[in-house]
Image: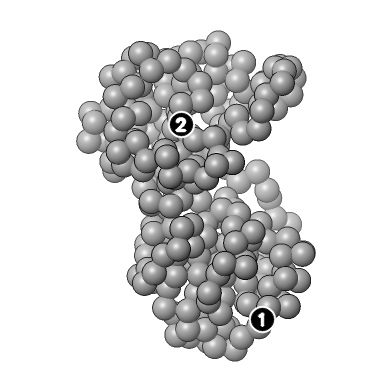
Amino acid sequence: MKIAEIYRFLDALSPFELQEKWDNSGLLLGDFNQDVHTVILSIDLDEALIESIPENTLVVTHHPIIFGGLKQLRFNEYPAKLLQGMIQKNIANIAMHTNFDRTHLNTYVAEEVLGYPIVARDGFVAYMEVNDTFERFAHNVKQAFHLSHMKVVRCHDHLKRVALTTGSGASLIAEVEAECFLTGDIKYHDAMEAKTIGMSMIDIGHYESECHFGDILEKYLINLGLSVIISPSKNPFTYM
């Protein structure tokens, strides 16, 4: 099957036009006329993955390997080192990032991972009705995401409405209308802002909140008759 056919299928599933202006989703490496028989699904690309997969493979990733403007390709640096290996093996790459967050990932994490139906949406923010104590809800979140430890900003003893943005969504704090906001990559100054406006926050991890990308997408792609493999993407962080 040609990459152009797969791209059209993915675009119908999660339109690339829904991505944020700063994002770089779409076909990042390869040729629309290229034939592929195998599709690898992964959050990211790394050297081990590139070395392990066969030539003429399409890798559909969540995060774009090319994000900012590339001014040079130095093959001892990121991302050029990875791109060199991909080009040598004729490996193509399509990224589905913020468009997929918006159409699928937030929904899956809320309903399938946490077990709460989404009651409202506002762009990249999904809202859930929780009606539970902060202590009990936080404990459930920790178990659901398999977190060894958890950062929280606690401003409430009881939670009714909780907001969710997978990945790194702390920049949306001012737009959130809930007692608690779940997202990853919460920084010190994000926590200070949340504390000031009286919003509880729970850091659910960037990797931990997005690691289901392949599981979600696989069930759609196998209907195309392609060989679909979910890469066991690894969290670059280890916790001690």
Residues 15 and 235: in front is 15
Q: Secondary structure at mark 1?
A: loop
Colour pattern of the rendering: one colour
- The residue to which callout 2 is attached is 26
The correct choice, above or below, for 161 with respect to 36 in the image is below
| Mark 1 to mark 2 CA distance (whole Å) | 38 Å
- Image point (37%, 13%), residue name: 34
User: In this orientation, which residue lies closer to the viewer: 89 or 72?
Assistant: 72
In the image, residue 22 sits, relative to residue 149, either above or below, namely: above
Q: Is residue 147 visible?
A: no
Mark 1 lies on residue: 198
Query: Which residue is at 58% across, 83% downward?
Result: 135
Q: Is residue 144 visible?
A: yes
Instruction: Give the quarter of the image for residue 151.
Output: bottom right
Q: Which quarter of the rendered picture does the N terminus lie within? A: top left
Tell me the amino acid under the disc marked 1.
Gly
